[in-house]
Image (cartoon, grey):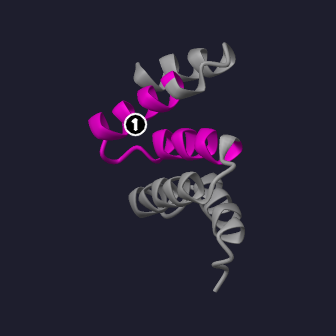
């Protein structure tokens, strides 16, 4: 439910509220990489400062740990690491 609510909030440009919903979904569904993907993507797309990129990367890392086959989490993790200059 929090994942869906986060999507609705994101559609209405309520980014902070959407991120909060996604983070709650992460807490409630420990094996759900989709929630990590949504939260990290929202953060990464809004990230203008290094701490936000670092937070997004950490969330993507959780997603990959939860589901190593989640290609979108892996892709976004690569994007976050690129922005961190951490490609190795």
Disc 1 is placed on an element classified as: helix
Q: Residue 65, relative to residue 14: is it above or below?
A: below
Q: Nearer the viewer, residue 55 or 35?
A: 55
Q: Quadrant of the N terminus?
A: top left
Is 87 a magenta residue? no
Q: Main secondary structure of the magenta part?
A: helix
Instruction: Tell me how many marks there are.
Output: 1
Whole-percent x, y for residue 29 in the image? 32, 38
**Residue numbers of the magenta segment:** 17-45
Question: In the image as oriented, which residue stretches furthest toward the front?
Answer: 49
Residue at image coords 67%, 80% = 87
Q: Quadrant of the C terminus?
A: bottom right
Residue at image coords 42%, 58% = 62
Is 23 a magenta residue? yes
Q: Residue 46, relative to residue 6: is it above or below?
A: below
Q: Quadrant of residue 50?
A: bottom right
Q: Is residue 62 left or right of residue 50?
A: left
Residue at image coords 41%, 63% = 65
**Residue underneath mark 1:** 23
Number of residues whose C-alpha sits closer than 10 Å to that of mark 1, classed few (under 14), some (14–19) or many (20 or more): many
Whole-percent x, y for residue 46 in the image? 68, 40
Residue at image coords 49%, 22% = 17
Q: Quadrant of residue 81?
A: bottom right
Q: Is residue 22 left or right of residue 11?
A: left
Whole-percent x, y for residue 48 in the image? 69, 49
Q: Quadrant of residue 74?
A: bottom right
């Amino acid at each position: 439910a929090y994942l869906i609510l986060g999507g609705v909030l994101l559609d209405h440009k309520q980014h902070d509220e959407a991120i909060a919903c996604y983070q709650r979904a992460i807490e409630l569904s420990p094996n759900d990489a989709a929630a990590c993907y949504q939260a990290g993507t929202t953060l990464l797309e809004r990230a203008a400062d290094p701490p936000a990129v670092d937070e997004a990367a950490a969330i993507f890392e959780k997603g990959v740990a939860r589901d190593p086959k989640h290609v979108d989490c892996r892709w976004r993790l690569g994007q976050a690491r690129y922005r961190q200059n951490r490609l190795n």
